[in-house]
Image (cartoon, grey):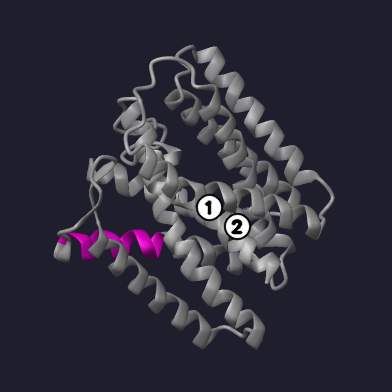
Amino acid sequence: MLKTRVLTAVVLLLVFSAGLILTSVDVFALGLGFVVAAGAWEWGRMSGLVNEDAQTAYAVLVGVVSLIALYLPYSEAWIQWLMLVGVLFWLSVPALFYLSPRQPPIVAMDRILLAIGLLVFVVAAVAIQYLRSFAPQGSSWLLLYALCIVWTMDIGAYFSGRRFGHRKLAPSISPGKTWEGVYGGLAATVVLMLIVMLVADFADGNRFKLLVATLLAAMISVLGDLYESRIKRAAALKDSSQLLPGHGGVLDRLDGVVAALPVFAFIWVWL
Protein backbone atom coordinates (compact mmCIF):
# COMPACT_ATOMS: atom_id res chain seq x y z
CA MET A 1 0.00 0.00 0.00
CA LEU A 2 2.76 2.44 0.93
CA LYS A 3 4.68 1.61 -2.25
CA THR A 4 1.59 2.26 -4.36
CA ARG A 5 0.92 5.52 -2.52
CA VAL A 6 4.49 6.78 -3.02
CA LEU A 7 4.56 5.75 -6.69
CA THR A 8 1.28 7.53 -7.38
CA ALA A 9 2.53 10.65 -5.58
CA VAL A 10 5.74 10.71 -7.62
CA VAL A 11 3.88 10.33 -10.93
CA LEU A 12 1.39 13.06 -9.97
CA LEU A 13 4.21 15.38 -8.94
CA LEU A 14 6.05 14.91 -12.22
CA VAL A 15 2.95 15.41 -14.34
CA PHE A 16 1.87 18.42 -12.31
CA SER A 17 5.31 20.05 -12.44
CA ALA A 18 5.56 19.60 -16.20
CA GLY A 19 2.09 21.03 -16.75
CA LEU A 20 2.66 23.93 -14.38
CA ILE A 21 5.99 25.08 -15.82
CA LEU A 22 6.15 23.91 -19.44
CA THR A 23 2.69 24.29 -20.94
CA SER A 24 1.11 27.28 -22.66
CA VAL A 25 -2.00 29.00 -21.32
CA ASP A 26 -4.28 27.07 -23.67
CA VAL A 27 -2.71 23.67 -23.01
CA PHE A 28 -2.76 24.27 -19.27
CA ALA A 29 -6.47 25.16 -19.49
CA LEU A 30 -7.15 21.93 -21.39
CA GLY A 31 -5.37 19.86 -18.75
CA LEU A 32 -7.22 21.73 -16.03
CA GLY A 33 -10.49 20.88 -17.75
CA PHE A 34 -9.68 17.16 -17.58
CA VAL A 35 -8.86 17.41 -13.86
CA VAL A 36 -12.12 19.27 -13.26
CA ALA A 37 -14.06 16.60 -15.16
CA ALA A 38 -12.48 13.87 -13.02
CA GLY A 39 -13.39 15.73 -9.84
CA ALA A 40 -16.91 16.34 -11.16
CA TRP A 41 -17.33 12.64 -11.89
CA GLU A 42 -16.61 11.96 -8.21
CA TRP A 43 -18.89 14.80 -7.10
CA GLY A 44 -21.73 13.37 -9.16
CA ARG A 45 -21.16 9.97 -7.58
CA MET A 46 -21.30 11.52 -4.09
CA SER A 47 -24.41 13.52 -5.04
CA GLY A 48 -26.49 10.45 -5.73
CA LEU A 49 -25.89 9.76 -9.42
CA VAL A 50 -25.77 5.96 -9.43
CA ASN A 51 -25.96 5.47 -13.17
CA GLU A 52 -22.50 5.50 -14.82
CA ASP A 53 -23.84 7.29 -17.90
CA ALA A 54 -25.32 10.02 -15.69
CA GLN A 55 -22.04 10.38 -13.79
CA THR A 56 -20.13 10.67 -17.04
CA ALA A 57 -22.61 13.17 -18.50
CA TYR A 58 -22.31 15.36 -15.41
CA ALA A 59 -18.52 15.19 -15.55
CA VAL A 60 -18.54 16.19 -19.23
CA LEU A 61 -20.97 19.04 -18.54
CA VAL A 62 -18.86 20.50 -15.73
CA GLY A 63 -15.64 20.00 -17.70
CA VAL A 64 -17.03 21.72 -20.81
CA VAL A 65 -18.50 24.66 -18.84
CA SER A 66 -15.16 25.06 -17.07
CA LEU A 67 -13.29 25.06 -20.38
CA ILE A 68 -15.66 27.68 -21.78
CA ALA A 69 -14.99 29.85 -18.73
CA LEU A 70 -11.24 29.32 -19.06
CA TYR A 71 -11.19 30.24 -22.76
CA LEU A 72 -13.31 33.38 -22.40
CA PRO A 73 -11.36 36.59 -23.11
CA TYR A 74 -9.66 37.76 -19.93
CA SER A 75 -11.46 40.52 -18.06
CA GLU A 76 -10.57 41.72 -14.58
CA ALA A 77 -14.22 42.55 -13.86
CA TRP A 78 -15.24 39.00 -14.84
CA ILE A 79 -12.63 37.54 -12.46
CA GLN A 80 -13.65 39.90 -9.65
CA TRP A 81 -17.32 39.02 -9.69
CA LEU A 82 -16.84 35.30 -10.26
CA MET A 83 -14.42 35.10 -7.33
CA LEU A 84 -16.87 37.08 -5.21
CA VAL A 85 -19.55 34.46 -5.89
CA GLY A 86 -17.14 31.71 -4.86
CA VAL A 87 -16.09 33.50 -1.68
CA LEU A 88 -19.70 34.15 -0.68
CA PHE A 89 -20.46 30.46 -1.07
CA TRP A 90 -17.55 29.33 1.10
CA LEU A 91 -18.36 31.97 3.72
CA SER A 92 -21.87 30.50 3.92
CA VAL A 93 -20.56 27.01 4.68
CA PRO A 94 -19.98 27.62 8.44
CA ALA A 95 -23.62 28.66 8.75
CA LEU A 96 -24.60 25.44 6.98
CA PHE A 97 -22.49 23.41 9.41
CA TYR A 98 -24.11 25.21 12.35
CA LEU A 99 -27.68 24.81 11.12
CA SER A 100 -27.26 21.26 9.85
CA PRO A 101 -24.04 19.56 11.03
CA ARG A 102 -25.16 16.23 9.61
CA GLN A 103 -26.33 16.20 6.03
CA PRO A 104 -29.28 13.82 5.50
CA PRO A 105 -28.22 10.55 3.84
CA ILE A 106 -27.95 10.91 0.08
CA VAL A 107 -30.13 8.14 -1.33
CA ALA A 108 -31.22 9.83 -4.57
CA MET A 109 -29.94 12.46 -6.96
CA ASP A 110 -29.38 15.73 -5.09
CA ARG A 111 -29.91 18.53 -7.63
CA ILE A 112 -28.73 21.23 -5.24
CA LEU A 113 -25.43 19.45 -4.64
CA LEU A 114 -24.97 18.96 -8.38
CA ALA A 115 -25.50 22.68 -8.98
CA ILE A 116 -23.08 23.53 -6.16
CA GLY A 117 -20.51 21.24 -7.73
CA LEU A 118 -20.76 23.06 -11.05
CA LEU A 119 -20.26 26.39 -9.30
CA VAL A 120 -17.37 25.20 -7.13
CA PHE A 121 -15.42 23.63 -9.98
CA VAL A 122 -15.86 26.50 -12.45
CA VAL A 123 -14.81 29.11 -9.89
CA ALA A 124 -11.80 27.05 -8.77
CA ALA A 125 -10.64 26.41 -12.35
CA VAL A 126 -10.80 30.10 -13.25
CA ALA A 127 -8.98 31.02 -10.03
CA ILE A 128 -6.17 28.60 -10.84
CA GLN A 129 -5.77 29.91 -14.39
CA TYR A 130 -5.94 33.52 -13.19
CA LEU A 131 -3.17 33.07 -10.62
CA ARG A 132 -0.93 31.34 -13.15
CA SER A 133 -1.44 33.50 -16.20
CA PHE A 134 -3.36 36.75 -15.71
CA ALA A 135 -2.98 38.11 -12.17
CA PRO A 136 -0.60 40.99 -11.37
CA GLN A 137 2.67 39.16 -10.73
CA GLY A 138 0.80 36.04 -11.81
CA SER A 139 3.02 33.11 -12.69
CA SER A 140 3.48 29.40 -12.17
CA TRP A 141 5.27 30.34 -8.95
CA LEU A 142 2.33 32.36 -7.60
CA LEU A 143 0.00 29.45 -8.32
CA LEU A 144 2.45 27.02 -6.73
CA TYR A 145 2.63 29.21 -3.63
CA ALA A 146 -1.18 29.29 -3.37
CA LEU A 147 -1.24 25.49 -3.61
CA CYS A 148 1.53 25.21 -1.03
CA ILE A 149 -0.67 27.14 1.41
CA VAL A 150 -3.20 24.32 1.29
CA TRP A 151 -0.58 21.58 1.51
CA THR A 152 1.26 23.29 4.37
CA MET A 153 -1.97 23.88 6.25
CA ASP A 154 -2.90 20.24 5.83
CA ILE A 155 0.49 18.87 6.91
CA GLY A 156 0.81 21.25 9.85
CA ALA A 157 -2.71 20.43 11.02
CA TYR A 158 -2.05 16.69 10.77
CA PHE A 159 1.09 16.66 12.89
CA SER A 160 0.00 19.26 15.44
CA GLY A 161 -3.37 17.58 15.74
CA ARG A 162 -1.77 14.23 16.43
CA ARG A 163 0.57 15.71 19.02
CA PHE A 164 -1.62 18.27 20.76
CA GLY A 165 -5.18 17.68 19.56
CA HIS A 166 -7.92 17.52 22.19
CA ARG A 167 -10.78 19.82 21.22
CA LYS A 168 -12.76 18.45 18.29
CA LEU A 169 -13.32 20.85 15.41
CA ALA A 170 -16.39 19.20 13.85
CA PRO A 171 -16.93 15.78 15.46
CA SER A 172 -20.10 14.98 13.52
CA ILE A 173 -18.35 15.62 10.20
CA SER A 174 -14.68 14.68 10.66
CA PRO A 175 -13.94 13.29 14.15
CA GLY A 176 -10.17 13.34 13.66
CA LYS A 177 -9.86 17.10 13.15
CA THR A 178 -9.11 19.34 16.13
CA TRP A 179 -8.78 23.04 16.86
CA GLU A 180 -5.17 22.45 17.90
CA GLY A 181 -4.57 21.01 14.44
CA VAL A 182 -5.99 24.15 12.84
CA TYR A 183 -3.73 26.36 14.97
CA GLY A 184 -0.70 24.25 14.10
CA GLY A 185 -1.57 24.39 10.40
CA LEU A 186 -1.90 28.17 10.54
CA ALA A 187 1.45 28.44 12.33
CA ALA A 188 3.13 26.33 9.64
CA THR A 189 1.49 28.45 6.94
CA VAL A 190 2.76 31.67 8.54
CA VAL A 191 6.29 30.23 8.50
CA LEU A 192 5.90 29.44 4.79
CA MET A 193 4.64 32.96 4.11
CA LEU A 194 7.53 34.59 5.97
CA ILE A 195 10.07 32.52 4.05
CA VAL A 196 8.49 33.50 0.73
CA MET A 197 8.41 37.16 1.73
CA LEU A 198 12.11 37.00 2.55
CA VAL A 199 13.23 35.37 -0.68
CA ALA A 200 10.73 36.71 -3.23
CA ASP A 201 10.67 40.20 -4.71
CA PHE A 202 7.25 41.62 -3.84
CA ALA A 203 6.23 45.26 -3.87
CA ASP A 204 5.02 46.56 -0.51
CA GLY A 205 1.38 46.52 -1.59
CA ASN A 206 1.65 42.96 -2.79
CA ARG A 207 3.24 41.92 0.52
CA PHE A 208 0.07 43.05 2.27
CA LYS A 209 -2.05 41.20 -0.28
CA LEU A 210 0.06 38.11 0.24
CA LEU A 211 -0.45 38.30 4.00
CA VAL A 212 -4.23 38.62 3.79
CA ALA A 213 -4.63 36.11 0.96
CA THR A 214 -2.45 33.53 2.71
CA LEU A 215 -4.24 33.64 6.05
CA LEU A 216 -7.74 33.62 4.57
CA ALA A 217 -6.95 30.89 2.05
CA ALA A 218 -5.43 28.71 4.78
CA MET A 219 -8.52 29.04 6.96
CA ILE A 220 -10.98 28.47 4.12
CA SER A 221 -9.08 25.34 3.01
CA VAL A 222 -10.29 23.71 6.22
CA LEU A 223 -13.89 24.40 5.16
CA GLY A 224 -13.28 22.75 1.80
CA ASP A 225 -11.97 19.64 3.54
CA LEU A 226 -14.89 19.54 5.98
CA TYR A 227 -17.48 20.17 3.27
CA GLU A 228 -16.27 17.23 1.19
CA SER A 229 -16.10 15.04 4.32
CA ARG A 230 -19.71 15.97 5.10
CA ILE A 231 -20.88 14.94 1.63
CA LYS A 232 -18.89 11.69 1.73
CA ARG A 233 -20.35 10.81 5.12
CA ALA A 234 -23.88 11.44 3.82
CA ALA A 235 -23.13 9.29 0.77
CA ALA A 236 -21.62 6.54 2.98
CA LEU A 237 -18.29 6.74 1.15
CA LYS A 238 -14.83 6.57 2.69
CA ASP A 239 -13.11 8.08 -0.38
CA SER A 240 -14.51 10.14 -3.22
CA SER A 241 -13.30 7.37 -5.59
CA GLN A 242 -10.30 5.13 -6.23
CA LEU A 243 -8.99 7.03 -9.27
CA LEU A 244 -5.63 7.65 -7.55
CA PRO A 245 -4.18 4.35 -6.28
CA GLY A 246 -3.24 4.61 -2.63
CA HIS A 247 -4.70 8.11 -2.31
CA GLY A 248 -8.42 7.72 -2.96
CA GLY A 249 -9.99 10.18 -5.35
CA VAL A 250 -9.13 13.46 -7.01
CA LEU A 251 -11.34 15.36 -4.57
CA ASP A 252 -9.64 13.71 -1.61
CA ARG A 253 -6.48 15.52 -2.72
CA LEU A 254 -8.10 18.76 -3.93
CA ASP A 255 -10.93 19.41 -1.46
CA GLY A 256 -8.98 22.21 0.24
CA VAL A 257 -7.73 23.60 -3.07
CA VAL A 258 -11.19 24.19 -4.58
CA ALA A 259 -12.09 26.29 -1.55
CA ALA A 260 -8.80 28.09 -0.86
CA LEU A 261 -7.69 29.21 -4.32
CA PRO A 262 -10.82 31.24 -5.16
CA VAL A 263 -10.33 33.07 -1.85
CA PHE A 264 -6.65 33.70 -2.62
CA ALA A 265 -7.56 34.92 -6.13
CA PHE A 266 -10.36 37.09 -4.71
CA ILE A 267 -7.93 38.95 -2.45
CA TRP A 268 -5.40 39.25 -5.27
CA VAL A 269 -7.86 40.76 -7.73
CA TRP A 270 -9.78 43.00 -5.30
CA LEU A 271 -7.02 44.51 -3.11
At horizontal 32% and vertical 28% (from top left) the residue drawn is 237
- Disc 1 marks which residue? 16
Q: Amino acid at mark 1?
A: Phe
Give whichever of 216, 195 is nearer the camera. Answer: 216
Residue 246 lies left or right of residue 124; in this view the side is: left
Quadrant showing the N terminus: top left
The answer to whether any part of residue 258 appears in the image is no
Mark 1, Cα crowd under 10 Å, few <14 / some 14-19 / many 20+, is: few
Inspect the magenta stretch and tell me whether residue 165 lies in it: no
Quadrant position of residue 111: top right
Residue 117 lies left or right of residue 107; in this view the side is: right
Give whichever of 236, 59 is nearer the camera. Answer: 236
Quadrant showing the C terminus: bottom right
Residue 194 position, x and y percent, is 45, 82
Q: Is residue 234 above or below residue 50?
A: below
Residue 28 position, x and y percent, is 67, 49
Residue 36 position, x and y percent, is 58, 38
Q: Amino acid at mark 2?
A: Leu
Q: Main secondary structure of the magenta part?
A: helix
Instruction: Kindly indicate whether the residue at mark 2 contacts the one at mark 1 (C-beta within 8 angstroms).
Output: yes
Give the magenta part as a residue range. Answer: 151-162
At horizontal 62% and vertical 44% (from top left) the residue drawn is 32
- Disc 2 marks which residue? 20
Residue 174 lies left or right of residue 198; in this view the side is: left
Mark 1 to mark 2 CA distance (whole Å): 6 Å
Figure label count: 2
Provide the secondary structure element on which disc 1 rests. Answer: helix
Quadrant position of residue 107: top left
Inspect the magenta stretch and tell me whether residue 159 lies in it: yes
